[in-house]
Amino acid sequence: DEAFPAVFQTASGLKAINLAYRGYGPHQMLRILETGGEIPATARYRPIQAFYLFIPDHLDWAAGNSYWDPDEPRYELDPGGLLRYRGPWRGRLAAAAIKHFYRSAVARWCWQHWPHAADREDERDVERFAAIVAELRRVFKERYRGDFSVLFLSSSDSGHSARRIMEMLRRRGVAVAMLAEAVPELSRQELYLPHDGHPGAAQHRAVGIYLAQRGLAER
């Protein structure tokens, strides 16, 4: 396995579980925990540390702009600044239509090239996203009594939105690490997956080794 949890486990000797799910962001993770969902791996082992790997697209996804999950949960901030679950982003008919429509490669291409919230850097989306991650940390710590950290990989994540997210998360007490400052490989944009933004095998290996040497291995 080339993902950083497997690399970390090999390098550190500690048990690591990869809970990533394709196309999911922190809003889906939060909803799973809120509704009492339990993944078999976390039922068997008590997590002492969770790492959430941020990519810029997650901001867009949490704003309801992911065609592959028409049932994705919607969170909004109320007038008092509290995060509230508002149900799915789409109704049943819209969800069914999207599932059918996006079987088309042309439709998927149009969606991917349509200007979404992340392109506009909507401040409301940034605030919502930071609140989702902060609440995810709170729920995780309450359930597992473990630590929760957010990993920012590349210097390309340092745009306006990412900087605002980091600022908001730190104000909310969330541990944030900009790994590109310590791991040069993470700044090599040609190694990221094209048209995707996800880190490739080289970046995953660098993250896993770095965390083993400087993270949990020091505890």
Image (spheres, rainbow, N blue to C red):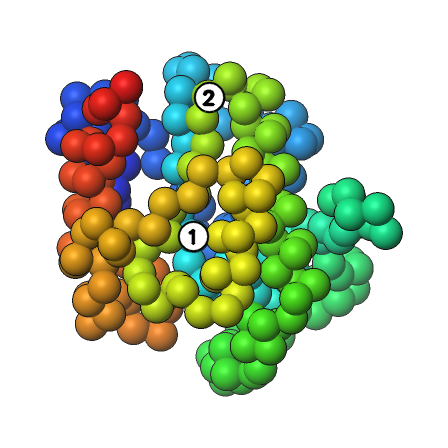
In which image quadrant can residue 69 be found? Answer: bottom right
Say which residue appears at 17% left-offset and 32% top-offset: 213
Q: Earlier in the sequence, mark 2 or mark 1?
A: 1
In the rendered image, the vertical position of residue 189 relative to residue 154, given as above or below: below
The C terminus lies in quadrant:
top left
Label 2: how many Cα within 10 Å (few below 14, some 14–19, many 20+): some
Could you tell me which residue is drawn at 72 percent across and 50 percent down?
Answer: 75
Residue 151 image point, x, y percent: 38, 46
Pointer 1: residues within 10 angstroms few (<14), some, or many (20+)? Answer: some
- In the rendered image, which quarter contains the N terminus? top left
Query: At x 50% / y 69%, what residue is drawn?
Result: 160
**The one of 40 and 162 positioned closer to us in this rendering:** 162
- Work out whether 159 lies above or below 177: below
Residue at the image position 43 percent from the left and 15 percent from the top:
46
Residue 166 coordinates in the image, percent (x, y): 49, 52
Percent from the top left, x then y, of residue 142? 59, 21
What label sits on residue 148 in the rendered view?
none
**Three-letter amino acid code at the position of disc 1:** Phe
Considering the numbered disc 2 on the image, is that residue within a helix, a strand or a loop? Answer: loop
| Label 2–label 1 contact, CB within 8 A | no
Label of residue 54 in the image: 1
Q: Is residue 152 above or below residue 189?
A: above
Q: Which residue is mark 2?
A: 146
| 12 left or right, relative to 72 | left
Tell me: residue 99, above or below residue 152: below
Q: Secondary structure at mark 1?
A: strand
Q: Is residue 130 visible?
A: yes
- Which quadrant of the figure has residue 42? top left
The quarter of the picture where residue 199 lies is bottom left
Q: Amino acid at mark 2?
A: Gly
